[in-house]
Image (tube, rainbow, N blue to C red):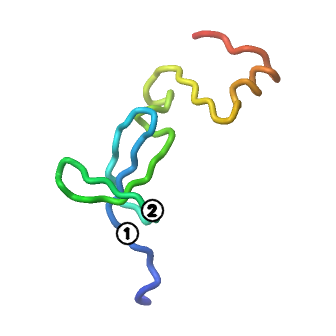
Amino acid sequence: MKTDIHPDYRPVVFQDLSEGATFVIRSTVKTNETITLEDGVEYPLVKVEISSASHPFFTGQMKIVDTAGRVERFERRYGTRRKA
């Protein structure tokens, strides 16, 4: 194999912004932010808006994440949504 062509594959913390949950996963994503967890180790930090901790499919709860008026635009086109 060629040397110095593969990205750095290391543990990275993904933090769900809406729930505050953190996941340590190995990844090659590049980030400038870092976080120190309870284990005392400093990890690169990636902030995500939706993860398995906050996604309605995984939690079983209806949750609307309004990003730049998407919900209002949908309701104008198709009418208001029904409550479950």
- Mark closer to the chain start, 2 or 1: 1
Residue 77: image x %, image y %? 82, 23
The front one of 12 and 44 is 44
Position of the N terminus, as image quadrant, is bottom left
**Residue found 69% across the figure and 26% down from its top:** 71
Asked if 58 appears above or below 15 in the picture, the reply is above
Q: Quadrant of residue 43?
A: bottom left
User: Quick one: 33 or 54, which is closer to the camera?
Assistant: 33
Question: What numbered label is drawn on residue 64?
Answer: none
Residue 34, horizontal then vertical, whole percent: 35, 58
Query: Marks 2 and 1, how far apart in space?
Result: 13 Å
Badge 1, how many Cα within 10 Å: few under 14, some, many 20+?
few
Toward which corner of the image does residue 84 lie, by quadrant?
top right
Closer to the camera: disc 2 or disc 1?
2
Residue annotated with mark 1 = 9
Residue, far bottom: 2
Q: Residue at x 34, y 66 (%)?
A: 10
Residue shown at 43% from the left, 26% from the top = 59
Instruction: Report which residue position mark 2 lands on.
Output: 31
Task: Report crowding for label 2: few under 14, some 14 to 19, many 20 or more residues within 10 A (C-alpha).
Answer: few
